[in-house]
Image (spheres, coloured by chain):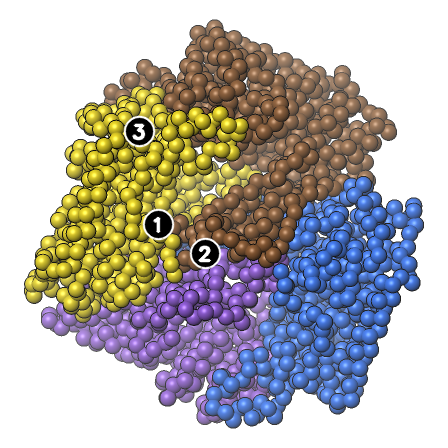
Chain colours: A yellow, B purple, C blue, D brown
Amino acid sequence: MANANVNCWPVVVIGGSSDQSQETTGAFQEFPQVEATRLYSKFSARPSSLAAIPSVIEKAVRTSMYGRPGACYVDIPGDMVNAKVDQSQVRQVTCCPVPPVSLAPPTDVLKAVALIKQAQRPLLIVGKGAAYGRAESELIELVERCGLPFLATPMGKGVVSDVHSNSVSAARSRALLHADVVVLLGARLNWMLHFGFPPRFNPHVKIIQVDLCAEELGNNVRPAVALLGDIRSVVRQMLDIFQKDPWSYPADSEWWKALREKMAANAEMSKALASAPSPMLNYYSAFQHISQLLPPDCVLVSEGANTMDVGRTMILNRLPRHRLDAGTFGTMGVGLGFAIAAAMLERSKSAPQRVVCVEGDSAFGFSGMEVETMCRYKLPVVIIVINNNGIYSGVDAETWAELEKMDDLATIAPPVTLLPDARYDQMMTAFGGHGFLVRTAAELRLSLQESLSDWQLPSLINVLIDPASDRKQQEFPWLTRSNL
Amino acid sequence: MANANVNCWPVVVIGGSSDQSQETTGAFQEFPQVEATRLYSKFSARPSSLAAIPSVIEKAVRTSMYGRPGACYVDIPGDMVNAKVDQSQVRQVTCCPVPPVSLAPPTDVLKAVALIKQAQRPLLIVGKGAAYGRAESELIELVERCGLPFLATPMGKGVVSDVHSNSVSAARSRALLHADVVVLLGARLNWMLHFGFPPRFNPHVKIIQVDLCAEELGNNVRPAVALLGDIRSVVRQMLDIFQKDPWSYPADSEWWKALREKMAANAEMSKALASAPSPMLNYYSAFQHISQLLPPDCVLVSEGANTMDVGRTMILNRLPRHRLDAGTFGTMGVGLGFAIAAAMLERSKSAPQRVVCVEGDSAFGFSGMEVETMCRYKLPVVIIVINNNGIYSGVDAETWAELEKMDDLATIAPPVTLLPDARYDQMMTAFGGHGFLVRTAAELRLSLQESLSDWQLPSLINVLIDPASDRKQQEFPWLTRSNL
Amino acid sequence: MANANVNCWPVVVIGGSSDQSQETTGAFQEFPQVEATRLYSKFSARPSSLAAIPSVIEKAVRTSMYGRPGACYVDIPGDMVNAKVDQSQVRQVTCCPVPPVSLAPPTDVLKAVALIKQAQRPLLIVGKGAAYGRAESELIELVERCGLPFLATPMGKGVVSDVHSNSVSAARSRALLHADVVVLLGARLNWMLHFGFPPRFNPHVKIIQVDLCAEELGNNVRPAVALLGDIRSVVRQMLDIFQKDPWSYPADSEWWKALREKMAANAEMSKALASAPSPMLNYYSAFQHISQLLPPDCVLVSEGANTMDVGRTMILNRLPRHRLDAGTFGTMGVGLGFAIAAAMLERSKSAPQRVVCVEGDSAFGFSGMEVETMCRYKLPVVIIVINNNGIYSGVDAETWAELEKMDDLATIAPPVTLLPDARYDQMMTAFGGHGFLVRTAAELRLSLQESLSDWQLPSLINVLIDPASDRKQQEFPWLTRSNL
Amino acid sequence: MANANVNCWPVVVIGGSSDQSQETTGAFQEFPQVEATRLYSKFSARPSSLAAIPSVIEKAVRTSMYGRPGACYVDIPGDMVNAKVDQSQVRQVTCCPVPPVSLAPPTDVLKAVALIKQAQRPLLIVGKGAAYGRAESELIELVERCGLPFLATPMGKGVVSDVHSNSVSAARSRALLHADVVVLLGARLNWMLHFGFPPRFNPHVKIIQVDLCAEELGNNVRPAVALLGDIRSVVRQMLDIFQKDPWSYPADSEWWKALREKMAANAEMSKALASAPSPMLNYYSAFQHISQLLPPDCVLVSEGANTMDVGRTMILNRLPRHRLDAGTFGTMGVGLGFAIAAAMLERSKSAPQRVVCVEGDSAFGFSGMEVETMCRYKLPVVIIVINNNGIYSGVDAETWAELEKMDDLATIAPPVTLLPDARYDQMMTAFGGHGFLVRTAAELRLSLQESLSDWQLPSLINVLIDPASDRKQQEFPWLTRSNL
């Protein structure tokens, strides 16, 4: 039911369950599924007759897309699957139009603009709501017209390109800490943004919150200006004002200077890490090579612990809605399913783009079996497994061999340790795809180029990195426990 | 936390439950209350520490008011009630601002206006969303500037006065059936509006749906134009267009003629019913007298079966948010609680208005005991019980005496029959309020005048009407089973 | 579906809700009722067809009675109420047999008996499970054959008569505190028994726990012997052993002496309170007179704060299942509904017994309106309202008059204060029953005798007691916060 | 917490979730997990303090094991994981004793015995309740002493050995259809037993139902005798009667004759299928060889569609609790997790037994990735994948190649088709275990022998069978839609 104009795709899960006629008797897979999915879905229903199915599906699809998007669930009793109904008994429904949008009140937009103009240290934060809301043209225009620094949340990356010169991702912590006016565009002040609380945020920060969900406004921090509406439309409202009365944040401000200094320092540090003399790859060197070779328009799927975290800074997104990662819930195991869905969608396009899946070894383990599906449907996904033998950090093969000599492996092996040097690549070859085991930069580059050149089959590049490789030291770790 | 500018009042229920320290041991009233209230509330939580209470309450209050309003629940463990916490450990929160509003896109508003202008048989439907959204000035202006007929839903009554000459409530069924363009303003196409389906609606009706809840748009019927936004703001957007390019629906149209004819016929019928020669009162005669005497600015609470239904047409509302009735869920027993809350609020005002509660005898029975509360707090509520000895229709005292002679009263008494001529008035005198038993129009008028003259004590007027009294015949009954 | 042999009556609530064909459209009272009742019921279902109703009802009835009894819920869609189905499509079901019972393993019963024999300070606690399980003959035999002291929980009262000489209710706290072996018969170690924890229980107490619910065994305290089975059957197993090898706990033990001393002291104190020289009645004097006049076989319903608590000790139960009170959940407002149900059941018997309802004034206020139902069905319930103008303690009329002079009654009136000297009796006369206002012992006795002499109509005796009347000082208050 | 005497092992899932101090702020993985697991667990809780953890865990463990066993869930807030508490504040708890058991009333046992003696066509059905209840000795004695035919449910297999001469599994449908007295031992009359309804059961069958769960008694069919109690104890009660008054069902009865005839015919048919002249293996030939080589005491895990169904009849269990399959819910993907748990338990024993996992290719795909875990912990599980390229039936490689030539594989490939000849064995070698690809009986036998000889590493035998191989024709398919 998707079409080129829609802001998002409906997410409706259709479940099958026991026959309606066998309810309460202990039927096969009898379970109150609608009730069980209540907490996970915006709308959940089980049609009570065949005739009711079309309108229930319409409502599920529409509810999934309208307002804040979310999943819906429809449970079809087993005995309806092959049943028939006289068409005259069915109320006709048509596919719903694209989601309605709304605008913020002009006076509030004026207030927001005034606040931005007064800011000493302004910062835009671009969330996934901006991506869902297709606000990219407007946001690029805002960034460029006004010369503002911006940060993206993980799923907001690419709305404005990560390589845009106004992106301050490389100085994320500093930007959050010192900004005095933050324009929050479809991002939640949840754990991913440290709740908007000190010590990660300036206690006096003024927040301009733009969101289509009224109940989100004011969560955790009371905004200076709350703009309820569609992000694309609201940013257009701002731009109309800036167009009539042009204004630009000075490029030579102390704030830009401080941000650029920090970015340079961080870039230096990443570069140092990426070019460490060790013969083994580490996160930074691996990602450096990967990011150099990935097509700029590829759809990037990513999950893992360090892999996702470091990858968020090292692998850049140039296009909106081209990054799928574990998101707000941080659920591991979603990556390969995301990649399959993305590849199916790309296949349906005239100019399909690459789907590349950068996985931590632990994350891959949650649903690695899906390589069979990729091979079966010949989906040319490129999977890169960053393999450090563990979660956060691993153990090398020799240490592991020592451990194994001890009495009870189950007791001794650290709980976050995985099998050393596991041959994930052979899982792919087992089902007919390409598999590569790489240990060096050269091998990595070669195998990635080869993988990208084949549009018929999936590939898996198993990148053995130094098990002791770690992220660079953070001023604040990513998932800081808040200090309320 | 209410203030004069807010659109609505937060509804947050604070529950008390078992001590946190006794969870899972079988504590006094231990129960998963947060879970139990999930289906009934927009937000439901149990603070895990004293320090968390202010932010949880703030979130509950805000969530209750922002977006589509609704109840929230906060559960306070018993052992927190008298506990203390160092203030420095508590994150400070401030009362949330008034709810944010949004506007519809100008192009869509233009489309809506164009559609209204093309309508042969236009109709505005004013729902409770318009009342919550305080859209009264704008709607009166729209009705008058454009000369449009309008209907109100039960809780939408009074946004534009029921006595306004453009109100077509007295021709409700005809208006719904023949309208070709309906502007739906904060009303849902649920059972109260017959789902928007034929045969109660024209199958080709074009609907302009105005709502602040995106997920409501398109429910049951696909709208011709969907305007997502605050009703007040969206109507103001329409008015701006009508102001620049004035237009008015012709007062001499066939549609107005047909509506006025039906209204006159219905008024005639009501008048005939109200002035039936019988010595006993009936619904129509009772309501005629009541409506003549009620202060135009009184807060009217109402519940019951026929009492609420007939009362909706016979007792007119001139002001918005001055009618509280059983609403969408049709829950009986809410009336006296509503009246107490309204009277407490009025008492806090410099110019309090009267609270009048028109109750069916059955509805009164759900929470009649609350008269004690009214007496205790000296709330000058006027309760009028329309007493027909039953639900929908009752049995007179003589028939009842016959029934009683039979063997088993429990078996024989019709399930919807109440005690004949019950002295509800004596319940009020039992607690010190005024009680009146009335059987004639003169008694009814006298007692109501007397009740309204006392601002110190509540009154209850027990109006004995003909148990056989019924509503007039409907083209369609109110609660029609839809014919899908 | 009850019959004389069943251990309990099924509790199945049949709800009506929206039409199946209107699901998801916003139907009248559409709500996921089955889901909403899940937490409150053992089984909850909505039949998906007319043909499914009999088997769903059968399962609900059976589930309600089998195992630990509990309520079940069946939701009937509105469009099934008057629908028809071909009988041949309906699977025939018959009413389920009486609940199955089970026995404890003989070796465990032997262990329990051995432990009882070794006890220095034994105590039986008779819970409502013993009442539901109809274990009265067996328990009387156990108490008498072995000369053991016993206590009853509120709903376990009367399984062995409260006037039995082995009842140590009057020394409840001491008995719980010092017992070294407790035989727990169908009672939970929840808040009502202070969780079985010190300081209310001996930390070294050995518990013999008899229950039909395996999951109850070991809750809070690990039992010395756990006997899973039907209480009646398990006690019979114990008796068989005591019959073969007779044993009796010495009547002249220190334990009996200590208990009897405490009971005498408490009786003295109650007697003193009951015969206080004040002209006004208090809890103790009122209950003394009431208990003297009540028929020994009456069904006693009770709820309230002090009223229920003091009443539990002062009003004695001689028969099992003849006491209905607020029970484990302590829910107020259940009393009049209980009384109506009990009176309907008694009416169906050849030798009906009296239903007497002893209510606190606050508790009565939750559902006092039900007096209309009693009058309508001529149910000869005797309601006694113990009226102290408040919850726990009230305010007298003069103090109240002082309070009223102050500015804002709503602020000043203590939250647990009710209207002084409310004429609850007039609520009963309003509907044709008998009403009495009593202030003295003589008035109380006379009105109660008169009420009990009429089997045609309900009565309400409004007993004005001293608002300052309170319970006697407790070593431990009833609802002690546990000191974990 | 398991010990050698317990009837079952507790199943308690410990979840970790968001910090207690961050509730309602949008914390990392904040979700109402206790509420979400309510429908799936017997007990679900989140301790509100560190001090509460031991008693909550104790309650979860105990609840999981007592009564009908089931899973429990305990959610530990993230901020408790490394927190500390003064031990004096923690209530000490000890590990709960083995589950309590109960017996049926002797008179009911006598009735059951009398009914068995009168039976013309008796049948025992042994369910998983008999396995959990460790009733094997008693049931073997019952079968042998009385000469009764028996059937096992999938998880009840092995309580009495499948190779026992009284097992009538090979005539399952006939046995169910004609039995006039069925003794149901810890098995539910749910879909797995066709609800006990005709046409799969004799409409006049008399059922003796033995279960420890009172609410299970009478589900779907009203039993002739309901015996509430522990199966082991209840069967012992029966045996005591049969011992005193010996009785045996005649081995030369018509019933035995009919059953043995059907068994012989079915055995013949299986043998024919197993020795089909085709060069390719099919289900029957593969299972014949497997069953010949498996150690009689191995723990057998199985899941799949045909694989599990045919395997249930072809692979025999000689010991109780040595078979783990998808069970009542028929959930695919549980097999490898079961195998890992079983192998960990076996490793802890002095004489560990083999764990063998017979998987359909589709079922393996749900959690095949777990081979990495097996390799990491060196768990010597033997996995046999019965690979027919599909669910129920597959497509051979040539047909698949044809399909691939068509335009859109996603549209054309049948939804239940898997990748042809997938090399699941290479998944195992990828992680260091043994992998075998087999196409012939000889290869299968050799590889299985080799796998069984290594106790250090897991193996995976990928058995390519004829994609067109199917189960033999059934009188009734396994999962018949009931004909109510």
Labels 2 and 3 positioned on one and the same chain: no
- What x and y, as percent, mark residue C353? 78, 68
Labels 2 and 1 positioned on one and the same chain: no
Element marked by disc 2? helix
Cα gap from disc 1 to disc 3, whole angstroms: 26 Å
Task: Name the residue rendered at 58%, 27% in the picture.
Answer: D346
- What x and y, as percent, mark residue D8? 63, 36
Cα gap from disc 2 to disc 1, whole angstroms: 15 Å
Task: Please tell me which residue lies in front, B330 or D387.
Answer: D387
Task: Please tell me which residue lies in front, B252 or C206.
Answer: C206
Cα gap from disc 2 to disc 3, whole angstroms: 38 Å
Task: Please tell me which residue lies in front, D284 or B225.
Answer: D284
Residue type at mark 1?
Leu
Task: Name the residue rendered at 57%, 92% in the picture.
Answer: C401
Q: Which residue is mark 2?
A: D20
> Residue A464 shows which numbered tag?
3
Residue type at mark 3?
Leu
- Mark found first going from the N terminus, 1 or 3: 3
- Marker count (numbered): 3
Q: Chain of mark 3?
A: A
Q: Chain of mark 1?
A: A
Element marked by disc 3? strand
Q: Which residue is mark 1?
A: A479
Q: Is residue C219 above or below residue B462?
A: above
C465 lies left or right of B482 = right
Is disc 1 surrounded by few (<14), some (14 to 19) or many (20+) residues within 10 Å? Answer: few
Q: Are marks 2 and 1 in contact (CB under 8 Å)?
A: no
